[in-house]
Image (cartoon, rainbow, N blue to C red):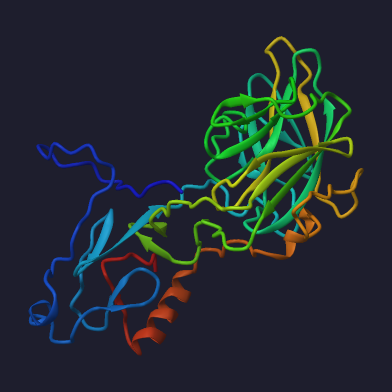
Amino acid sequence: MAPSFSDRKPSQGSGSNSKSRKVSNRRRGSGSSANAGNKNGPAQSNGLGSMVMVSSDIVAAEVGEIRENVNAIRIMYDNRKYAMLDDFSRVCLSYEHRASQLKLSDDKLTVTGWKGFCSVRCTHGIFQGTWYCEATIRHLGPAGHCRLGWCTRKLELQAPVGFDVHGFGYRDVEGSKLHKGRREPYGDSFQQGDVIGFWIHMPVGGEPLEPKFQDWIRFKGKWMQLDEPEVAPRPLIGSMIGFSKNGVFQGVAFKDFSEGTYYPTVSLFTLPEQEAGATVTLNFGPSFCFPPPVVPGVSSPARPMCELAVSPPPPPRPPTAAELLTNVAIMTGATGAVLAAGLDFGL
């Protein structure tokens, strides 16, 4: 999730180049001193990230971070051009979480790439349990290459999986594994026509570490979301990632890595002189070309990734102005006009 920022330019002479600023309500303080000048008591929260008054006393807030006494929240603009491009009713490749030069098929199960390494992940990820899916290498060509693996939502899409700390990759050349950009011997190399299985095991106890899309506010004519602070992931003992080639398990490639939500990922490469792109097709089940591997020490059988389509649900849409005002009236018991912390509801 992008950091919060302000759309206002710093005033001259401020000497600040920061895109995010902390600002306070015009009424500062806490306890009785903070409420002494407010005949109606302290401001109330409507649960949507805005401060609400039921009288004509408005708590003014500026862009950046809104502060109530000593409690601050961060907000961020929702800059997506298109909302809800991914179909969460089925597991497929993500249109939103892909490098722009990658082309997806109409069913979003096949990806084709040209000219340099770039990546796409699927729409659904897992943070616990044992899961499996397959990828068929449709076409590579004389200069094409492919890396397959698992990544978190922070993967750099203009780089191959395994390039950084946020991904774990399996390389077509030499069959090496990659993490943090380091190659190590692992399994067999693979090429056009091979079927590669993605296998992952995440024991109970890890956290998903995904952003929660639940609180929206409208600020300065734009929809904004509450930005939650980052949580440092902990190592998840017993976690494992492995791959298979044409039904033959290549062994456990990575283990005891950090908790979080992991997504199957495809990275493709060709040289500029190759006209035909590299193409890979994903299969999320329930029927596979080869059965999921049985790994010693893991008692639970691998489940097909297609079962994730029933959960989690897609992020909710931003509430309408009428819905926001309804929620405010319910929270505050207001029956007349509602004044909200300098927020423009666009009515």
- Residue in the image at 84% along x and 47% along y: 293
Image position of 60 with respect to 266: above or below? below
Q: Residue 261, image x and y in percent?
A: 59, 53
Quadrant of residue 100 within the rendered picture: top right
Quadrant of residue 42 within the rendered picture: bottom left
- Residue in the image at 85% along x and 49% along y: 292
Please name whichever residue, 295 or 304, is drawn nearer the observer in this view of the structure: 295
Q: Residue 29, image x and y in percent?
A: 11, 71
- Residue in the image at 39% along x and 53% along y: 76
Report whether 235 appears left or right of 331: right
Q: Residue 73, image x and y in percent?
A: 31, 62
Please name whichever residue, 144 or 100, is drawn nearer the observer in this view of the structure: 144
Q: Identify the image quadrant of the C terminus.
A: bottom left
Report whether 277 appears left or right of 216: right
Image position of 339 with respect to 296: above or below? below
- The residue at the far top in this view is 273
